[in-house]
Image (cartoon, rainbow, N blue to C red):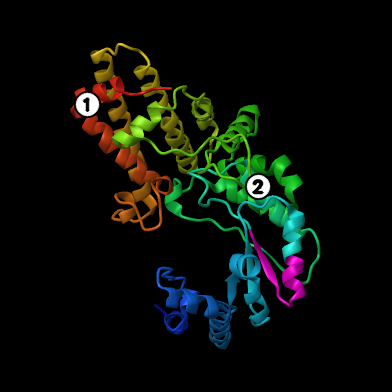
């Protein structure tokens, strides 16, 4: 390590030490560690929160400014949830205006004006992968990116610092499988939503895969964004996408899958077929295309596993030989997919990461693609070893 690098490292450590020291003395209102069962403690939080939030953020700003750094705060609390805090903040702090569901650029502009009226500058922060998506985001998320770009970039506003694309929890997705989303966002930010819609994915294809655009490629990109499964919630976002599900990996999940009743039409089966046809056309970054195809395979198999057990359970009386063959086939395919996902993980991530084999703090199985398939593979392997249990589970299922 060179002397300039060592100096930079010491500076960063000094900065973080001072920031952490400030957090360690923060009031309960800032830490968010509220014990509501304790009346005295809860009252103390209620009365100290606004000043505590503002004072701590201002102190952190002073520390960073003294080190030649710019302090930026997330805007969800200080702008929308507890706007009183904003009136107490140092005006040199920049507000990071994030919202991964907002599709209305007019409402985003209102936030810019609100923050600017109080003397602050703001950065727009739409999202790509976030909590509500699985390994792929849908068309609605592209609209979120477009709305922020329109609000923050298309109109000249001195209070707008620009836009940054946020992307969360890499264990959601297969590494190197979502470059098309980043490329699309870059076109939106630099040339506008209309240009991105008309040529974003074509240009990505030509630049990243060095392939020629045609109707099959167009269909493939349209299908992956239209069908991307998401957490179903009451929000401003709605669309044709499927409900985000995890592959069943215990008795309760298998029982829940069987109660669905009617299998859905799996949109990823056609997409996998398209990608198989298109792979020979990829002349550059083939590994990235294969990562994309692996992601689609995982999505296709989630819904395929549901369909085959629903269809089998509906054939009463059950044929024991057929259920034995079915669970053996499921277990074999699960093992192969989990192995492929693990190999891909090890190529660019830490092979000994806990995220491969256990559920991380504050995450759910839907947030950890590899972990959910390792769990599914272990479960189907156990059923394949004791096929009578699988037969009993299907035979006793109460289908709709």
Q: What secondary structure is found at the residue carrying circle 1? A: helix
Nearer to the camera, 305 or 68: 305
Q: Position of residue 285 (x, y in %)?
A: 50, 44
Indicate whether 165 appears above or below 30: above
Q: Is residue 122 left or right of residue 261?
A: right
Where does the image place residue 259, in percent across and percent down from the top left?
41, 27
Residue 11 visible in this rendered orientation of the protein = no
Asked if the stretch drawn in magenta spans residue 107, the answer is no
Could you tell me which quadrant the C terminus lies in? top left
Residue 286 visible: yes
Instruction: Report if residue 123 lies within the magenta region.
Output: yes
Q: Is residue 241 left or right of residue 176?
A: right
Tell me if label 2 and label 1 are in contact, CB under 8 Å.
no
Most foreground residue, 47 or 50:
47
Magenta range is 112-125
Specify the label residue 389 is tagged with: 1
Residue drawn at point x = 46 percent, y = 74 percent? 42
Position in image of residue 391 (x %, y %)? 25, 21
* Label annotation for residue 236: 2
Label 2: how many residues lie within 10 Å, few (<14), some (14-19) or many (20+)?
few
Residue drawn at x 56%, y 84% is 55
The residue lying furthest to the bottom in this view is 66
Of label 2 and label 1, which has the lower sequence position?
2
Q: Which mark is residue 250?
A: none
Secondary structure category for the residue under label 2? loop
Residue ID at (53%, 46%): 178
Q: Position of residue 197 (x, y in %)?
A: 71, 42
Name the residue rendered at 72%, 59% in the picture: 108
Front position in the image: 107 or 294: 107
């Amino acid at each position: 390590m060179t002397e300039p690098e060592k100096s930079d490292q010491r500076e960063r450590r000094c900065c973080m030490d001072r920031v952490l020291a400030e957090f360690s003395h923060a009031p309960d209102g800032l830490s968010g560690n509220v014990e509501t069962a304790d009346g005295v403690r809860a009252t103390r939080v209620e009365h100290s929160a606004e000043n505590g939030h503002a004072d701590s953020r201002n102190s952190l700003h002073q520390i960073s400014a003294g080190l030649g750094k710019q302090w930026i705060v997330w805007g969800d609390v200080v702008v929308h949830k507890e706007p009183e805090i904003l009136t107490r903040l140092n005006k040199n702090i920049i507000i990071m205006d994030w919202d991964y569901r907002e599709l209305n650029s007019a409402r985003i502009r209102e936030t810019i004006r609100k923050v600017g009226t109080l003397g602050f500058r703001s950065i727009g922060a739409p999202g790509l992968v976030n909590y509500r998506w699985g390994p792929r985001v849908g068309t609605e998320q592209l609209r979120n990116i477009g709305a922020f770009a329109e609000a923050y970039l298309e109109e000249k506003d001195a209070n707008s610092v620009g836009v940054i694309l946020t992307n969360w929890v890499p264990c959601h997705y297969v590494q190197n499988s979502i470059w098309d989303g980043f490329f699309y966002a870059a076109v939106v930010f630099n040339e506008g939503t209309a240009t991105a819609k008309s040529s974003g994915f074509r240009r990505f294809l030509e630049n990243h895969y060095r392939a020629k655009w045609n109707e099959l490629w167009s269909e493939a990109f349209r299908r992956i964004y239209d069908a991307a499964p998401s957490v179903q919630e009451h929000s401003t976002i709605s669309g044709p996408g499927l409900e985000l599900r995890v592959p069943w990996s215990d008795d309760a999940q298998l029982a829940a899958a069987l109660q669905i009743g009617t299998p859905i039409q799996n949109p990823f089966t056609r997409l996998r077929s398209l990608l198989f046809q298109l792979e020979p056309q990829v002349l550059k970054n083939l590994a990235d295309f294969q990562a994309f195809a692996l992601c689609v395979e995982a999505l296709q198999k989630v819904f395929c596993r549901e369909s085959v057990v629903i269809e089998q359970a509906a054939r009463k009386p059950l044929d024991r030989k057929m259920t034995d063959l079915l669970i053996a086939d499921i277990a074999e395919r699960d093992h192969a997919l989990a192995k492929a996902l693990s190999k891909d993980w090890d190529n660019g991530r830490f092979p000994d990461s806990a995220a491969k084999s256990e559920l991380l703090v504050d995450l759910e199985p839907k947030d950890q693609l590899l972990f959910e398939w390792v769990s599914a593979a272990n479960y189907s392997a156990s059923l394949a070893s004791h096929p009578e249990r699988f037969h009993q589970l299907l035979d006793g299922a109460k289908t709709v």
